[in-house]
Image (tube, rainbow, N blue to C red):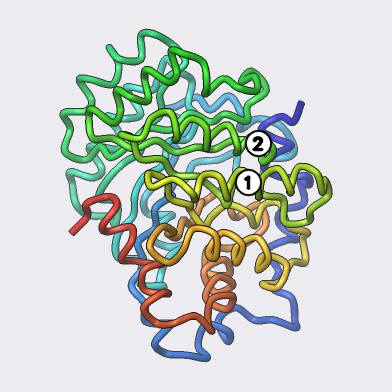
Amino acid sequence: MTTRREFLTASAAAAGALAVPTFWHPLAAAEKESSVTDLPIVDTHQHLWDLKLFKLPWISGKDVQPINKNYVSSDYIAATKGLNVVKSVYMEVNVDPAQQTKEAEYVFDICKKGDTPMVAAVIGGSPHEKAFSDYIKPLAKNPYLRGVRAVLHDPDRPKGLCLQPTYVDNMKLLGDLGLSYDLCMRQEEVIDGAKLAEKVPGTRFIIDHCGNMDVQRKDAAAVKACQEGLKAAAALKNTMCKISGIVVTAKEDWKPADLAPNINFCLDTFGEDRVFFGGDWPVCTLKSSYAKWVAALKEIVKDRSPAFQKKLFHDNAVKFYRLA
């Protein structure tokens, strides 16, 4: 079974991966069209972690050593400088379950201070447990909360977990509370996410990271299963697809054309009103700087209409997360 560490990256040599190939320069690519460069960006997938405050069980080991350090708001502001990131939504970082409430309060406080782009949050939780309702109901009263995520590709999360009765009941509860749920799962199990969304039409679901479809497509059967799952999800009215994360599955000397098939499949499958951008920082830095990832996505969608691009990078997120 794929571990979280293996999933994030197959290589520990992330530092070398940050070098920009000579045949494609992200800043030059982004500057080809000023209307694209000037797009306001809402980042729907911003991580932060302070290892002095939180324990992240998954972040130890050589394969994730480059990001086994603190990442705080000032680091995010530096990473996004000059990119017109106007707002961001925090994404939970799979802390020790005992610290989930502490994590939520930590990010709510950042949102409240108002001195960073972060204006809303998706927090962690354990919807496979019956006690989830006691955890989420008090937090749901916070005006900065928008949704919940529990990573489903961890080794202790069996296939089909999200379809178990307790999980389904807790997804219904999220809808009742006006909260969304992020599906972050193995690529071959995206179909389970679609089945869950079909069972719970009153809850809004987001498929993270283009379904975690492997850019290098090493397992053709898994990629096909992912695509079928994405199509099944897109056939429902209560699903969105987040264009994020997939760069970590690319080869070290990747270029935009390597990411394009996965991204275009998702854009075409879900349509312009049901997709939005996510930075996945700092996890993306295992293979790419934030600026390089943004420039690559702009390069991939440059021939789509300006309205499409604005929806992808800004408008859809503002509407979905009620950020106006």
Relative to 141, 272 lies left or right: right
Image quarter where the C terminus lies is: bottom left
Count residues near mark 1 (Cα–Cα under 10 Å), then give few for <14, some for 14-19, many for 20+.
many
Question: Which amino acid type corresponds to the residue marked 2 in the rendered image?
Answer: Arg
196 relative to 68, above or below: above
Counting from the top left corner in percent of width and height, residue 254 is at: 74, 66
Q: Nearer the viewer, residue 276 or 20?
A: 276
Q: Who's the residue at 58% across and 63% down the image?
A: 289
Q: Earlier in the sequence, mark 2 or mark 1?
A: 2
Counting from the top left corner in percent of width and height, residue 313 is at: 40, 67
Counting from the top left corner in percent of width and height, residue 148 is at: 37, 32
Counting from the top left corner in percent of width and height, residue 23 is at: 75, 83
Count residues near mark 2 (Cα–Cα under 10 Å), then give few for <14, some for 14-19, many for 20+.
many
**Disc sitting over residue 186 in the figure:** 2
300 relative to 274, above or below: below
Relative to 273, 163 lies left or right: right
Tell me if residue 311 can be seen.
yes
**Disc sitting over residue 272 in the figure:** none
Tag 2–tag 1 contact (CB < 8 Å): yes
**Disc sitting over residue 212 in the figure:** 1
Q: Who's the residue at 28% across and 21% down the image?
A: 136
Question: Which amino acid type corresponds to the residue marked 1 in the rendered image?
Answer: Asn
Tell me if residue 82 can be seen.
no
Query: Distance between the Cα atoms at labels 2 and 1?
Result: 7 Å
Image quarter where the N terminus lies is: top right
